[in-house]
Amino acid sequence: MKEEMNTPSKSPATVLGSEDSFRLLVESAKDYAIIMLDLSGHVASWNAGAERIKGYRAEEIIGKHFSCFYPAEALQRGLPEQELKAAAKDGRFEDEGWRVRKDGQQFWANVIVSALRDKDGTLRGFSKVTRDLTERKQAEVQIQQQSKEIMELSTPVMQVWQGVVVAPLIGSLDSNRTQQFMERLLGRIVETNSPVALVDIMGVPTIDTQTAQHLVETISAVRLLGAQVVLTGVRPAIAQTLVHLGIDLSGIMTRASLSAGLQVAFDILKLQVVSKDSSH
Amino acid sequence: MASESISVIKLRDLLLVTVPPDPDDETVSALQEQVLRAMAQHEAKGLVLDISTVQTLDSFFARTVAETVQMVGLMGGRTVLAGMRASVAVTSTQLGLTVGNSLTALNVDRALDLLNAAPSGSRRV
Amino acid sequence: MNENEPHQGEFRITSENDIVMARKVVRDAATTLGFGLTDVTRIVTAASELTRNIYHYAKSGVMHWRVLNSGTENGLELTFEDQGPGIPDIEKAMEPGFSTGKGLGMGLPGSKRLMDELTIESTVGKGTTVVVRKWMRK
Ligand SMILES: Nc1ncnc2c1ncn2[C@@H]1O[C@H](COP(=O)(O)OP(=O)(O)O)[C@@H](O)[C@H]1O
Ligand SMILES: [Mg+2]
């Protein structure tokens, strides 16, 4: 790429010819940054939209390399060069990602890079059209966040077998969420008449004293109903934390995996069946 | 008068006692009296307390139940608390209550199974 | 909440049977306001503890209830007021298991856990006022 800097090349603007009306249109477009790059990626033309979106004025940026619009992480991946290569190869390259304004602020951009070729098909440079989609991106992020929260709130309590419910806990547990979980779990146990509840904490990243207390409370409440909790998915890190926090889990059945927990559940149910039979 | 609302049913060697939905303190105390008398009278080996309609379990009620379980135990009987509502279980736990050495069951059927079966229950609260 | 529903009320506690009656009053108020079953049970259970304290330690007193609105949330406030002996050491009384009667000593600390807020004002020889609040979870 760098060697090409010395290549004497016609400005891409001249490639487009001198259609003044078209140039006017491009220059005045406010919602699109429309710029031309020479073969090596140096800015050759700049419009009003580019100034608005990227923050540089034409005099400041023309002649500079376009990699200054990219965040460090994208530069590390060599994204600017890749974009030009892909556009040169396929004629067009489209991408969405974070870009950097002059003031250092990032914005979410939709970028289309097109190769500009002259009549002979010789590559002369690139056009680059950038749209600022930060608002849309923020909305997306918010929706993702919300649906994650909704998913977390509605931790399912599923009946997986006659007499066994499973409740996988996913994500971090605050008191409000644990309290709602406790109410739903107890409700389901009663509804489904299930003597065994498997509470799987494999998906819980960390546990603190308060959360552990809530779990212990939940387990006590389940016992009051006449059912039993088997705590499953106790990862090594969680086991360490529980012991270090001094949480008393004695009398609480725990298993490393959900399948081991299911085995316990069946043993409990079988015991009940056997004892039922032996009573007649 | 209060004790009229408590029903004590004898099933073979077991007693089934149904606790009213919202008993006053007098009724709760009378329940203990009545249960102990019936235990002695019928030489029952076990007691099922059906609390499935109970809406509020406060510390007075819980203490009386825990005491009764203990007393029945001294008389050689085992007690199963049957059918506690989910809302009541959550509340009692949060209030910090325990119901002593009582066994628990999801409903009366299971409670009867429990008493008729295993020699010593493992599900103590 | 219905516009026509009363937003506050008052109930006198003078006999043991009034504990049950107070529970009914509170259950109705909390249910009408729209609390879920478990929260209703929490509020009623706390009310049961606090009216029993009035009956046991002060013989008589009054329970007020009123609907709260913070602008964004509705809530229920219960005030238990008596002219009884008062509590000499409130901190001690709030300890789980502490009882000068033959109770479990869970009434005050338990009510604090069941409700969102609990405050006690008490003067020995003058009386005790306990205020509890529960906000509706969204
Ligand atoms: N209204 C009251 N007036 C005077 N003393 C009270 C009152 N309420 C509570 N107390 C004191 O606080 C103690 C703790 O109360 P509580 O937690 O309800 O437990 P309990 O009633 O089982 O003793 C009581 O034993 C009593 O000494
Ligand atoms: Mg009390």
Image (tube, coloured by chain):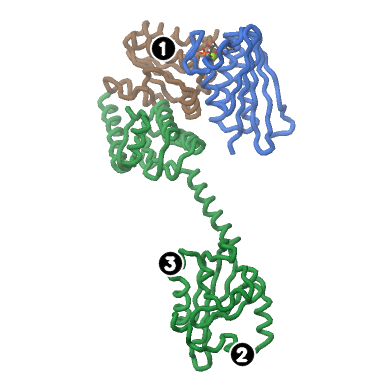
Residue A17 lies, in percent from the top left, at 61, 90
Label disc, if present, on residue A17 of the rendered structure: 2
Number of the front mark, 2 or 1: 2
Q: Are marks 3 and 2 on the same chain?
A: yes
**Pick the front one: A67 or B28:** A67
- Is the residue indicated by label 1 positioned so its CB lies within 8 Å of ligand 1? no
Give the x, y percent position of residue C68.
Answer: 68, 30
Say which residue label 1 marks: B68
Whether the residue carrying mark 3 lies under 8 Å from ligand 1 is answered with: no
What kind of residue is marked 2?
Gly
Q: CA distance from mark 2 to mark 1?
A: 100 Å
Would residue B113 be seen by someone viewing this image from the given angle?
Answer: no
| Residue C38 sits above or below residue C110 on the image | below
- Of all chains, the one bearing label 1 is B
**Mark 3, other Cα within 10 Å: few <14 / some 14–19 / many ≥20:** few
Q: Are marks 2 and 1 in contact (CB under 8 Å)?
A: no
- Disc 3: which residue: A76
